[in-house]
Amino acid sequence: MLNRTMVITLERFILEQEALQPDDRGELTNLLYDIALGAKLIASQIRRAGLVNIVGTAAAVNVQGEEQQKLDVYANETLQNALNHTGRVCAMASEEDEGLIPIPAGYSPGRYAVMFDPLDGSSNIDVNAPVGTIFAITHRLSSEGQGTERDVLQPGTELVAAGYVIYGSSVMMVYSTGNGVHGFTLDPTIGEFLLSHENITTPRTGKYYSVNESNFGRWSSAVQRAVRGFHGDDPARIKGKNSRYIGSLVADFHRNLIAGGVYLYPADLKNVHGKLRLLYECNPMAFLAEAAGGKATDGSRRILEIQPTSLHQRTPLVIGSAEDVDYVSTVIAEIEGRP
Ligand code: FDP
């Protein structure tokens, strides 16, 4: 008989998954749990944002030259504090910090390096639209002591886990260790993430395309042609799609992951290397997209195979349902005269 009181918590699920990865000695499980704790703290601040006068800019400018929101600062500190004392992490890199974040004196560095965008889509905070936290985890390459840039500048093929937390109408954590993509919804009454979406697979082709079309006139003609295909101008090869763009990568990616679709942030005349960061946004999302049966490219190359050369490197991104991502690569190759 069905046990109607049985729920699967994040902790239980990742412990059971750990049996599939015996070399990790429980550390990866605990590391994911540390991130979940940080996310719960961030979620609770976001919920109170309008109440505690925390909305608005923190009168600081981050390394990307963007205004930092107060919640960006809070989220960044919270994640670092959730990770830096555990003995599991040798170094962290955050979209909000210029350099590598060392482990504070008095704590031992561990076996993993963690990269994160603590509060993605933060321009949406003041208007109550969904934002998220994105993370990626690698094994360290250096042998001991504090981690080095080499530990974080690894291609996405080397990730051991990645995921995001979406702070939307509900709070969800979605992660993969390469073995399926699993989603957990936070039950606020008990403060636990409960398994709600096991083994998410993304449709081969999707209903939606998501891109900031105000940049249309600044894209290459190849990208313009591909997006026109999504408008319905190339019916022999691709069915027209519905447009959906929140302008919050986590939210746009999450919708397309579940419903099927493609998100693009191509290079344009203002953002000549694209806007999104390889380490904190593109690699973790590409890892998830592939684990769910989708794809991610920069328009031609597979995102996960790009060798990062600097902490804040940007790349164009085309990500989502495999056939839709392939369509963009095909059109770009044709127009650029590549095989
Ligand atoms: P934001 O600047 O609000 O942090 O990475 C940044 C990001 O948001 C993504 O989440 C989002 O998809 C994109 O930028 C939106 O950029 P545009 O406003 O240029 O469309």
Image: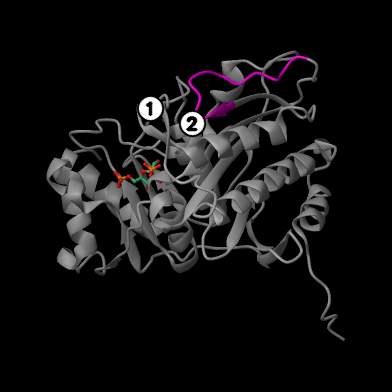
Going by the numbered disc 1, the residue's amino acid type is: Gln
User: For the stretch drawn in magenta, what is the main secondary structure?
Assistant: loop
* Magenta stretch holds residue 235: no
**Mark carried by residue 172:** none
Give the residue displayed 71% in from the left and 46% down from the top.
Answer: 37
* Pointer 1 with pointer 2, Cβ within 8 A: yes
The residue furthest bottom is 1
Q: Which residues are magenta?
A: 93-105
Give the x, y percent position of residue 303: 44, 38
Quadrant in the picture for residue 287: top right
Q: Is residue 332 left or right of residue 64?
A: left
Q: Is residue 283 visible?
A: no
Q: Is residue 106 left or right of residue 254?
A: right
Going by the numbered disc 2, the residue's amino acid type is: Glu
| Circle 2 residue | 95
Q: Is residue 138 visible?
A: yes
**10 Å neighbourhood of mark 1: few (<14), some, or many (≥20)?**
few
**Mark carried by residue 64:** 1
Give the residue displayed 64% in from the left and 37% down from the top.
Answer: 78
- Dot 1: what SS? loop
Give the x, y percent position of residue 80: 65, 31
